Image: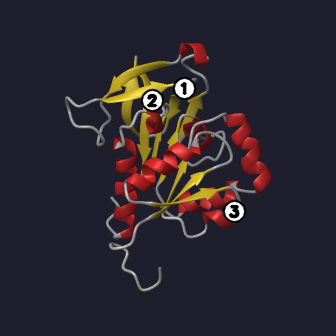
């Protein structure tokens, strides 16, 4: 891509592909105009403009990240200001007790096991417009049990925090990739493109 200006090329977004429905995220990102790379080893992190950590099983993801030596590359990516999106187990992986990228503590399976899965209409600050909620699907979902002052709350369910943003990192406890509503991914890509254009807020 050398010689191509930042505002004219499609962003390259990685999707952590160790476990979970990473293919659904890849399809949604591609439909929104991003080039997508599956991330399985540290070399796959090089050159990314953004990264998505999908839902799945957080223990399996933790073992996979340790096995492949991905922890430090992912932390370095975030430390460089590259936007990240974590969904469901991805939120857990970003928290203080795992990758330590978000200043939050996530409570695993907080809403109950799979039999307690549910849907809810959410308005997410900065992502949805008033009166146009997003239908969110919660499957063995976590919630944010504690957070630092730099963390912005985007949405809650029954007074439990289910969506946050800290700098260029967005994390949600639901599965935005399975409803066909692309607003969470579009907001994430806005961060990616803003950074590419030197205008990240």
Q: Looking at the image, what colour scheme do you see?
A: secondary structure
Q: Is residue 93 visible?
A: yes
**Does dot 1 land on a helix, a strand or a loop?**
loop
Determine whether 141 is above or below 191 in the image: above
- 88 relative to 10 in the view: left or right: right
Determine whether 151 is above or below 80 in the image: above
Q: Can residue 102 be seen in this view?
A: no
Distance between the alpha carbons at the discs numbered 3 and 1: 28 Å
Distance between the alpha carbons at the discs numbered 1 and 2: 9 Å
- 80 relative to 122 in the view: left or right: right
Q: Mark 2 points at which residue?
A: 162
Cβ atoms under marks 1 and 2 closer than 8 Å:
yes
Cβ atoms under marks 3 and 2 closer than 8 Å:
no
**Front-lying residue, 94 or 20:** 20
Which residue is at the far right? 67
**Does dot 2 land on a helix, a strand or a loop?**
strand
**What residue lies at 57% left-to-right and 21% top-to-bottom?**
110
Q: Would you identify the image quadrant in which residue 37 lies?
A: bottom right
The number of discs equals 3
**What residue lies at 64% left-to-right and 64% top-to-bottom?**
44
- 85 relative to 44 in the view: left or right: left
Residue 49, x across and y down, in percent: 48, 64
Q: Would you identify the image quadrant in which residue 56 lies?
A: top right
Q: Would you identify the image quadrant in which residue 159 lies?
A: top left
Categorize mark 1 by other alpha carbons within 10 Å: few (<14), some (14-19), many (20+).
many
Q: Mark 3 points at which residue?
A: 42
Q: Mark 1 points at which residue?
A: 141
**Does dot 3 land on a helix, a strand or a loop?**
helix
Which residue is at the far left? 131
Q: Which of marks 3 and 1 is nearer the N terminus?
A: 3
Q: Which of marks 1 and 2 is nearer the N terminus?
A: 1
Residue mark closest to the camera, 3 vs 2: 3
């Amino acid at each position: 891509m050398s010689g191509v200006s930042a505002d004219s090329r499609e962003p390259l977004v990685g999707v952590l592909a160790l476990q979970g429905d990473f293919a659904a995220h890849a399809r949604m990102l591609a439909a929104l105009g991003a080039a997508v790379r599956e991330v399985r080893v540290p070399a796959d992190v090089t050159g990314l403009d953004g990264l998505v950590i999908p839902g799945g099983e957080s223990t399996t993801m933790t073992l996979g990240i340790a096995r492949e030596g991905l922890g430090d590359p992912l932390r370095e990516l975030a430390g460089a200001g590259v936007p990240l999106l974590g969904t469901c187990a991805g939120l857990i992986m970003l928290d203080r007790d795992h990758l330590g990228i978000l200043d939050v503590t996530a409570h695993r399976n907080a809403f109950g096991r799979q039999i307690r899965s549910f849907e809810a209409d959410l308005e997410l600050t900065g992502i949805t417009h008033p009166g146009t909620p997003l239908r969110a699907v919660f499957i063995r979902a976590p919630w944010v049990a504690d957070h630092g002052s730099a963390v912005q709350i985007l949405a809650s369910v029954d007074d439990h925090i289910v969506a946050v943003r800290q700098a260029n990192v967005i994390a949600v406890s639901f599965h935005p990739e399975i409803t066909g509503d692309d607003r969470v991914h579009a907001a994430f890509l806005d961060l990616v493109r803003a950074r590419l254009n030197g205008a990240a807020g």
